[in-house]
Image (tube, rainbow, N blue to C red):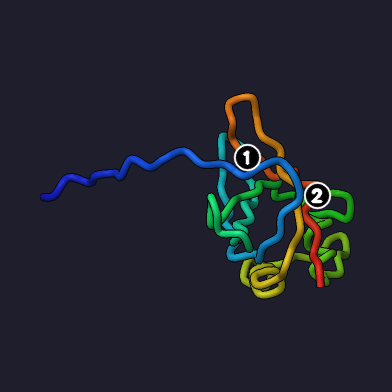
Amino acid sequence: MTEESFEVKEFVSLNDGKHRGIIKDIEINTRKEYTYADVIITLDEFEPLDEIKVGYPATISKLSGFGKLLMSCGFELNAGEKITLKVIKKGVIGKRVEFQTHKTSEGFSNVLPETVKVVK
């Protein structure tokens, strides 16, 4: 059996400010007892990174961050209705977005979730 190995990569991060990209995928992850929707964005600049993630609590309502993103992608949200991940992906993947990043004190680039907006 071959042991798995990992390549050591150079640390890179985005500059603070406004960026654009295209939503590539959405992954649903559970951490502890909470469920998150991680939105993966392919960056227009491709340097120094080619993609970045932004996480939202997976709660969908007209006032939640994830719900606001879905509404900006054309979803009509009605309380009590259910939306499958397949339907969400179909309506979100490929959308062009604009967003702001901010570096942490350690130098990591964080997308500010409330700034992710669909652009034409």
Q: Residue drawn at (71%, 38%), measured in percent from left and top?
A: 102
Residue 12 placement (x, y as % from top left): 51, 41
Residue 14 placement (x, y as % from top left): 62, 44
Label 2 Cα neighbours within 10 Å, binned few <14 / some 14-19 / many ≥20: some
Label 1 Cα neighbours within 10 Å, binned few <14 / some 14-19 / many ≥20: some
Q: Which of 82/19 is in front?
A: 19
Check the image and report above or below for 114 versus 106: below
Tell me the residue that label 2 is attached to.
115
Under circle 2, the secondary element is: helix
Give me the C-alpha separation between circle 1 and circle 2: 14 Å
Do we see residue 57 in this rendering?
no
Q: Which mark is residue 109?
A: 1
Residue 114 placement (x, y as % from top left): 81, 47
Residue 33 placement (x, y as % from top left): 60, 36
Q: In the picture, which quadrant includes the C terminus?
A: bottom right
Q: Residue drawn at (79%, 58%), measured in percent from left and top?
A: 69
Describe residue 19's horizontal placement relative to residue 78 as left or right: left
Describe residue 5's horizontal placement relative to residue 41 as left or right: left
Do we see residue 74 in this rendering?
yes
Check the image and report above or below for 63 versus 106: below
Q: Residue drawn at (71%, 41%), measured in percent from left and top?
A: 16
Q: Which of marks 1 and 2 is nearer the N terminus?
A: 1
Describe residue 81's horizontal placement relative to residue 1 as left or right: right
Work out which residue is located at the far left of the displayed protein and give it: 1
